Amino acid sequence: MVARVDFYHLLQARLENVLPRIAEKALSADKKLLVVVNDDQQALYWDQYLWRYRDTSFLPHGRVGEGDEAEHPVLISTTTEALNNASYIGLADGLWRPEALDFERVFYFFDEIAVQQARQTWRSLKDTESERHYWKQDEQTGQWQAVA
């Protein structure tokens, strides 16, 4: 399987605005998403945030350790183990994990703090069987544009 790796360089947008939309698009494509964060505190933050990020919609999700992990279309975890059988993974803490290439699609979110690691990851994936895409927001419109 060739993983598609989407690099999302967060300049203007906050992850709180981007991650829920990615999750919604994954669900509309009938795909499950694993959201990987750095620690339990971040997992709790995202769990609470995804319940209230928008008044007009519901994003079904769960957190590892709460039970019924296999049933959640969006699962928040501190590891890359897809207990929900996700085919998509979102790396929400700016840290690259090589195990992400085992997924069909990878969403790698990073900001200016993690940009050097993202560049190194981009170069390291050059010789792998992965399809790389780099997304950046247009400064005037705020729309995401494919840069590479």
Image (spheres, rainbow, N blue to C red):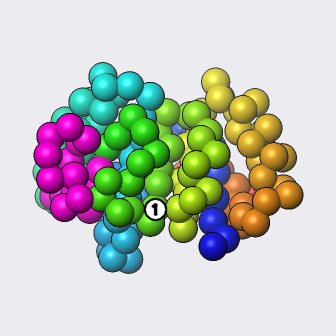
Q: Nearer the viewer, residue 79 or 112?
A: 79
Which residue lies under the disc numbered 1?
A: 88
Q: Position of residue 116 (x, y in %)?
A: 75, 30
Q: Which part of the image, by quadrant, shows the N terminus?
A: bottom right
**Secondary element at tag 1:** strand
Q: Position of residue 89 (x, y in %)?
A: 47, 54
Position above or below: 81 against 145? above
The residue range painted magenta reads 58-75
Type of residue at label 1?
Tyr
Q: Nearer the viewer, residue 27 or 54?
A: 27
Q: Is residue 35 left or right of residue 70?
A: right
Q: Is residue 72 left or right of residue 108?
A: left
Q: Which part of the image, by quadrant, shows the C terminus?
A: bottom right
Decide whether residue 67 is among the magenta residues.
yes
Residue 73 can be seen, yes or no: yes
Q: Position of residue 104 (x, y in %)?
A: 54, 67
Tell me what residue is drawn at x 20 percent, y 37 percent: 65
